[in-house]
């Protein structure tokens, strides 16, 4: 289940991003190829109080 939080990942090569967008199982691709492989930061949403 998605948390609704948004993150920005740094240094993801364009070809990796393209493969992610084209992947049938995006969650699986993300977990195997992006998560824990690139730096990231939490993006504040417009609904955040602070």
Image: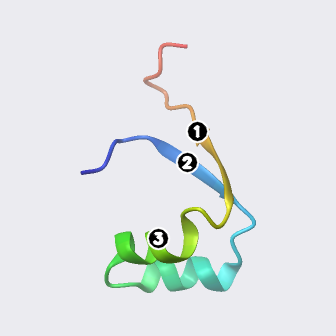
Farthest-out residue, right: 11
In the image: residue 23, left or right of residue 44? left
Please provide percent x and percent y for residue 13: 71, 77
In the image: residue 12, left or right of residue 4? right
Q: CA distance from mark 2 to mark 1?
A: 5 Å
Eye-nearest disc, 3 or 1: 3
State if disc 1 and disc 2 touch (CB < 8 Å).
Answer: yes
Q: Which mark, residue 30? A: 3
Q: How is the image coloured?
A: rainbow
Considering only vertical position in the picture, is 1 above or below 21? above
Please provide percent x and percent y for residue 15: 65, 86
Considering only vertical position in the picture, is 6 above or below 39? above
Q: Residue at x 49, y 78 (%)?
A: 20
Label 3 vs 2, first from the N-terminus: 2
Assign a secondary structure to mark 1. strand
Q: Residue at x 37, y 75 (%)?
A: 28
Give neighbour class at mark 2: few <14, some 14-19, many 20+ (Cα, 10 Å): few
Q: Which residue is mark 2?
A: 7
Q: Which residue is mark 1?
A: 43
Q: Residue at x 64, y 67 (%)?
A: 37
Q: Foreground residue, 37 or 8? A: 37
Considering only vertical position in the picture, is 13 above or below 45? below
Farthest-out residue, left: 1
Q: Residue at x 45, y 69 (%)?
A: 31
Please provide percent x and percent y for residue 1: 24, 51
Please provide percent x and percent y for residue 40: 65, 51
């Amino acid at each position: 289940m998605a948390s609704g939080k948004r993150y920005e990942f740094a240094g993801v090569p364009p070809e990796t991003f393209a493969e992610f967008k084209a992947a049938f199982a995006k969650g699986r691709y993300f977990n195997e190829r992006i998560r824990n492989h690139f730096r990231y930061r939490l993006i504040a949403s417009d609904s955040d109080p602070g």
